[in-house]
């Protein structure tokens, strides 16, 4: 049977496309896949995007002033000032949560027992581009979140409380994508570095401290008052938190309130992007290639 | 440019240079904690061949496939697919290969049809091409009725068929199947081989791993038997079975000292070419020995042994494996 003089002719295969061409179409298709998955759960996406900012704004800017526990000194002026500060914080926070929810949490399941990510890793493009695809899809969700959260944050408040918003469009339009990429990069790092079984601990140990010490409820400049022996320790400490640059940036983009100088915000956010994407892509590779 | 090479199915005939589509040279993978999964593996698979890696669990089959499909980075040695170094150009190699992994790694966020469609898009197929190919493969794999189903809700057999269909979406030149039929019912198994045979006759090279000898025997044109990260023998199933040097195998269960009985039978019965003890039985290799059965029984009885069971079979790949490793394949 094996000695039959059967000779077949088959060509030795060759890749049909250059790596660059195959990579760019594959990258586009990966994005398409993520956006289709997003569209399937659009209702949940919108709900999860709105629920947190809605609650924050509702409690702090509507309920508190009405029950006489207004934050900001009790006067209507103080409450309006707080409202102004909070709007920027809420937009920043919403973008950050998209980074976590759109990148870190799905990655945790896809890396885990199911290894679902494998089919995308086997697509004809470098593995780091698969990770970048996740970041871009997450960033798109972050941008959409910012756009739908902003109106809520600026509209819902008690009678007499008025957030004083002055939009600086060039800053806003550059800051939204920059922040969205940075927080998606953070999601990539968290989703790849943290073991799937520990992902719930991430909320307690990382997300919660970042949120409370991320300038959501207060401007960074005001932290100067928290001193030990003349040193504003808290103001220095929160500088390790990438969220502070996002919220301070939005403070500059949306209000006339005091904020961290933009010449600090932009370079540091860009630096965080570079570091988080670099670390995230390496960690992603380590997780999928053994 | 496509250069045509001739490929002979007879592995003994001289192979024209350059017709190989997979080559492993001293391929080695050492995992942390010094676990040597694959140990200096040399292997060549030719264009259009169905090649089987046969061995027990933990033999290093999956790691070998991992290194050839760019998911595992070798510690040493070389892996080439279509002459392209997998480590140096993984993304290029991925254009040419389709991979069906052992575990169900279907995209749970997508439906059955979408799993095929988006896979096609990843590989640069246009929306229309991908749609048509997905529809066609769903028919071929009898999954059309479940096209819109959530992949979480389909049966294990369907999920495996879908995984194979997905790997075929972009018409890969080389298809890697890691334990493709593990856990499949006989009907799904047959259906799977029907489709794969069709792909194969169109020139596709298939490298599969399996621990089912029967499957390797009937399906594969050439087999490499693996154990402890090494290839122990590699040839066509027929040649491997002939290499045992016997045309039948007699398995004897008996009371008493089996080692002494084996020795006795080998000395006193003509046609016994070898013997081996395995799990409380003796396996005698017989060649050109007609009417040997009564002789075995009488020699054993004269020696004071009581034969409790006896069977004669043709050599199988299992026999080959036992001859090479001294242990059974299934454990």
Image (tube, coloured by chain):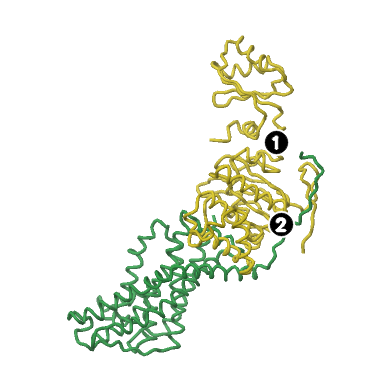
Chain colours: A green, B yellow
What chain is tagged by disc 2? B
Judging depth in this view, the residue of B152 and B31 nearest the camera is: B152
Q: Residue A186: x and y, percent?
A: 43, 69
Indicate left or right for B199 with A157 as reference. Answer: right
Image quarter where the N terminus of chain B lies is: bottom right
Q: Secondary structure at mark 1?
A: helix
Q: Are marks 2 and 1 in contact (CB under 8 Å)?
A: no
Badge 1, how many Cα within 10 Å: few under 14, some, many 20+? many
Judging depth in this view, the residue of B297 and B27 nearest the camera is: B297
Front label number (2 vs 1): 1
Q: Residue A31: x and y, percent?
A: 53, 70
- Which residue appears at 66% of the width and 59% of the height? B171
- Label count reads 2
Q: Which residue has dot 2 on it?
A: B83
Same-chain status of marks 2 and 1 = yes
In the rendered view, tell whether residue A224 sits above or below residue B168.
below
Residue A145, quarter of picture:
bottom left
Sequence-earlier tag: 2 or 1 = 2
Q: Residue A200: x and y, percent?
A: 36, 60
- Which residue appears at 71% of the width and 40% of the height? B235
Residue B245, quarter of picture:
top right
Badge 2, how many Cα within 10 Å: few under 14, some, many 20+? some
Q: CA distance from mark 2 to mark 1?
A: 28 Å
Q: Residue A179: x and y, percent?
A: 43, 77
Q: Secondary structure at mark 2?
A: loop
Q: Which residue has dot 1 on it?
A: B240
In the rendered view, tell whether residue B290 sits above or below residue B184.
above
Specify the farthest residue to the front.
Answer: B145
Does residue B263 show up?
Answer: yes
Mark on residue B305? Answer: none
């Amino acid at each position: 049977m094996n000695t039959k003089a059967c000779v077949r002719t088959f060509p030795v295969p060759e890749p049909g496309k250059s790596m660059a061409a195959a990579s760019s179409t594959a990258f586009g298709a990966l994005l398409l896949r993520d956006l289709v998955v997003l569209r399937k759960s659009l209702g949940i996406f919108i709900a999860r995007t709105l629920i947190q900012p809605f609650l924050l704004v509702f409690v702090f800017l509507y309920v508190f002033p009405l029950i006489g526990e207004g934050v900001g000194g009790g006067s209507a002026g103080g409450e309006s000032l707080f409202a102004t500060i909070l709007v920027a914080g809420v937009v920043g926070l919403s973008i950050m949560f998209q980074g976590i929810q759109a990148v870190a949490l799905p990655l945790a399941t896809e890396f885990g027992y199911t290894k679902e990510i494998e089919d995308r890793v086997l697509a004809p493009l470098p593995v780091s581009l698969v990770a970048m695809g996740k970041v871009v899809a997450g960033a798109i969700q972050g941008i959409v979140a910012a756009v739908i959260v902003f109106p809520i944050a600026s509209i819902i408040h008690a009678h007499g409380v008025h957030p004083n918003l002055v939009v600086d469009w060039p800053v806003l339009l550059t800051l939204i994508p920059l922040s969205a990429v940075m927080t998606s990069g953070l999601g990539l790092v968290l989703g790849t570095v943290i073991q799937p079984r520990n992902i719930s601990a991430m909320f307690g140990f990382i997300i919660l401290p970042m949120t409370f010490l991320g300038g959501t409820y207060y401007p960074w400049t005001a932290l100067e008052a928290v001193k030990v022996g003349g040193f504003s320790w808290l103001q220095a400490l929160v500088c390790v938190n990438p969220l502070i640059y996002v919220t301070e940036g939005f403070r500059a983009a949306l209000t006339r309130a005091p904020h961290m100088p933009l010449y600090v915000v932009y370079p540091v956010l860009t630096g965080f992007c570079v570091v988080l994407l670099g670390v995230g892509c390496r960690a992603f590779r380590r997780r999928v290639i053994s | 440019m496509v250069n045509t090479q001739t490929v002979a199915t007879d592995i003994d005939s001289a192979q024209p240079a350059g017709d190989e589509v997979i080559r492993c040279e001293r391929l080695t993978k050492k995992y942390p904690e010094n676990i040597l999964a694959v140990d200096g593996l040399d292997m060549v698979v030719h264009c259009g061949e169905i090649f089987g890696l046969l061995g027990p669990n933990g033999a290093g089959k999956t790691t070998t496939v991992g290194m050839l499909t760019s998911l595992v980075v070798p510690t040493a040695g070389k892996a080439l697919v279509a002459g392209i170094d997998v480590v140096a150009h993984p993304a290029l190699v991925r254009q040419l290969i389709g991979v069906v992994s052992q575990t169900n790694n279907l995209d749970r966020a997508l439906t059955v049809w979408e799993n095929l469609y988006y896979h096609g898009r990843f590989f640069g197929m246009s929306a229309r091409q991908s749609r048509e190919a997905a529809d066609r493969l769903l028919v071929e794999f009898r999954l059309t009725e479940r096209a819109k189903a959530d992949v979480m809700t389909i049966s294990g057999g369907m999920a495996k068929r879908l995984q194979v269909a997905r790997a075929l979406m972009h018409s890969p030149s080389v298809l890697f199947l890691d334990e493709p039929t593990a856990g499949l019912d006989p009907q799904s198994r047959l259906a799977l081989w029907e489709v794969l045979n069709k792909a194969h006759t169109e020139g596709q090279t298939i490298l599969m791993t399996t621990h089912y000898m029967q499957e390797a025997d009937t399906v594969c044109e050439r087999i490499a038997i693996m154990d402890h990260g090494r290839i122990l023998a590699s040839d066509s199933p027929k040649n491997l079975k002939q290499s045992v040097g016997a045309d039948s195998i007699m398995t004897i269960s008996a009371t008493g000292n089996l080692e002494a009985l084996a020795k006795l039978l080998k000395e006193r019965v003509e046609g016994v070419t070898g013997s081996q003890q395995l799990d409380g039985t003796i396996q005698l290799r017989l060649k050109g020995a007609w009417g040997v059965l009564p002789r075995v029984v009488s020699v054993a009885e004269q020696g004071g042994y009581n034969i409790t069971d006896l069977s004669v079979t043709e050599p199988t790949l299992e026999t080959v494996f036992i001859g090479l490793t001294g242990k059974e394949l299934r454990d």
